[in-house]
Image (cartoon, grey):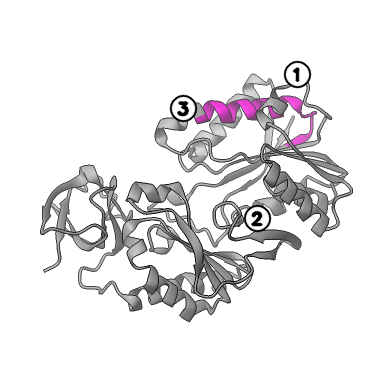
Amino acid sequence: MRDRLYIDDARQRVRSGHPWVYDNQVRRVEGQPQPGAIVQVFDVRKGPLGQGFFNPHSKIRVRLLTKHLDEPINAAFFRRKVQAAWDHRVRLGQPRSCRVVFGEADGLPALVVDKFNEVLVLQTLALGMDRFKAEIVQALHEVLQPSGIYERNDVPVRAKEGLPLVKGFIGEPFDTRLQIQENGLLFAVDVAQGQKTGHFLDQRLNHAAMEQVARGARVLDCFTHTGGFALHAAKYGASEVLGLDISGDAVEQARRNAALNGLGGNCRFEAVNVFDFLSAPQIAGGPWDVVVLDPPAFAKSKSALEGATRGYKEINLRAIKSLPPGGFLVTCSCSQHMLPDLFRRTIADAAHDAHRELREIYSGGQPPDHPVHWAIPETHYLKCLVLQVL
């Protein structure tokens, strides 16, 4: 008989579809499950909840894979799940470069697979999922027939699962440098050296929203990274674009992307500390007609949320003050702990302190290849607002 965990699911969170069982929910264990093993999970009051992989050293003690106690977790299981995830993307008409598997939202906790043209990049971010890496790779080959697969398991979260940080080719080596298209623009991607899996695919629809506000405008793109918002602004007719980032490597990549698209004439980039730039008495080179704020995640944990909220408020306050009446603020947050309502309240507080009013032009989030599962709030992390400052 398979090892069992009996848990307290008083809030019905797990039964409603959330796959994480925390250590403080576990009431008793039957058997001696090994780290990474599949266990059956039961509510101490209401019976079976499903099966998932177990890690006694993680705060997330079990990540559920299925609600069925008798479903085999094997190569065929992963083949079905990967096929379902890919069918979802195909049905919704996702581009050639997109996210193929978005972890919990696709029923495969702690698994991320991104597709760049015909190359796949794989992350197995929990012990149990890492144990099934061979089966997952087999499923990816069968479903997508990629030209190559690269492993980017060099992220710190793996250390919390007791896993080593590794990266490299799975199978035959290939050129990790390629060019992808986004909304008609070319972006250079290096799946071996770029951020996360090589390139951020989740801002595609929000980048496209720049078409509504960029024409003829002077645009300041803060935290530009490799130039996503900046290049879209230039593509959509901005008269001048300045992209800022603290990373010199990111700025060089943004310049290369501008050159790839023939946008170097009115789109320039500088390596500066954005916080210092925004804190100057008068933002250099202004006034700007559009200010974009797309910072890295300020709140990487709940304990960091209070400080992160202050940070979001401060940079938005500075941006709002710098805009003329009728100018536009494009503001984003990729912190999952910064919930949409709190994000809106934070921007509203900044506008109040700046004695300005806001009019909403656009509200966006993640594209369909990063689906939001309503029972799993953590899958809803990206917020983007385009606001007119009055």
Query: What residue do we see at 39% from left, 54% from top?
Result: 164
Q: Secondary structure at mark 2?
A: helix
Count of numbered marks: 3
**Residue 316 falls within the magenta-colored stretch:** yes
Residue type, label 2:
Leu
- Residue 96 located left or right of residue 85: right
Amino acid type at mark 3: Glu
- Circle 1 residue: 281
User: Mark 2 highlights which residue?
Assistant: 205
Q: Position of residue 324 (x, y in %)?
A: 80, 28
Residue 376 lies, in percent from the top left, at 39, 51
Chain part drawn in magenta: 308-328
At x 33%, y 57%, the residue is: 127
User: Which one is earlier in the sequence, the residue at label 2 or at label 1?
Assistant: 2
- Mark 1 / mark 3, whichever is N-terminal: 1
**Where on the picture, by quarter, is residue 182?**
bottom right
